[in-house]
Image (tube, helix red, strand yellow):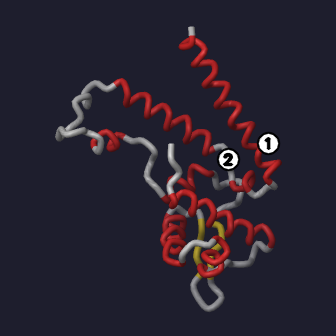
Amino acid sequence: MKITANEEYGLRIILRVAKIRENDDSKLVSLNEIAEAEGISVENTAAVLSKLREAGLVESVRGKYGGYKLGKGIEEINLYQVISAVSKDTFNVEFCETHTGNQETCVHSSDCSVRSVWSNLTNLINNFFANITLKHLLEDEKQAQTDIQGSFSILQEFTEKNLTGLRK
C-alpha cells in the first residue's frame, strides 16, 4: 500500500488545525499559516482543505479574521475519515475495471478470487485507520505509539491466527 501525497498532506493539515484548537478552542488558523507551517504550497493546502471541509472534518470562517477550525472533536475524527476525504478507496469494484490488461474487461470479471483478497485487505486497513483518532496523533510520539500499537496488536493477532493454518 502506498500513501499518496494528498493523504499525507490531509493528515498533516488537519493535525495542524487540531493543534491550534488544542491550545485555544476559539482560534482560527488561516490558509497561509497552515501552508507555511507545513511547507506545502498554498494551492495544495487550499485543495486539501476544500476536501476536508466537504467531508465536514474542518469548517471555514470567512472574513478578515477568518480561517479554519475542526468540524468535530479530536476524538471524533479518525484517520480513515481523513484519508477517505482526500483520496479514493484503496480498493473498490472500479479498481478491477482499470486493470483489465489489454482487454476491454478483465478476463476474471465474472469469477475472481483475487478480488476478495484486495477487498478483505482494504477492509482490514480501513478498520485499523478507523481506530486511530486525532486525539491519539496529538499525543507525544511515545504515547501515540503505545495507543496505536493497541490497534495494531488486534490486527496482528487476527493476521497471525489466520496465517497459522496457511504455514502448515
The percent coordinates of residue 92 (x first, y second) are 39, 42
Which residue is pictured at 61% across the width and 45% down the height? Answer: 130
Instruction: Kindly identify the amino acid type of the residue bearing the numbered disc 1.
Output: Thr
The percent coordinates of residue 136 (x first, y second) are 74, 51
Write down the residue under mark 1. 146
Helix, strand or loop at label 2? It is loop
Write down the residue under mark 2. 132
* Image-quadrant location for residue 125: top right
| Earlier residue among tags 1 and 2 | 2
Task: Calculate the distance from the C-alpha at mark 1 to the C-alpha at mark 2.
Answer: 12 Å
Q: Give 35 or 85, whichever is nearer the viewer.
A: 35
Which residue is pictured at 67% across the width and 25% down the height? Answer: 157
Q: Give 123 or 117, whichever is nearer the viewer.
A: 117
* Image-quadrant location for residue 68: bottom right
- With respect to residue 151, does 167 lie above or below? above
The percent coordinates of residue 71 (x first, y second) are 62, 66
Helix, strand or loop at label 1? It is helix
Which residue is pictured at 19% across the width and 40% down the height? Answer: 102
The answer to whether residue 50 is left or right of residue 34 is: left
Which residue is pictured at 68% across the width and 36% down the height? Answer: 152
Neighbourhood count class around disc 2 (C-alpha, 10 Å): few under 14, some 14–19, many 20 upward = many
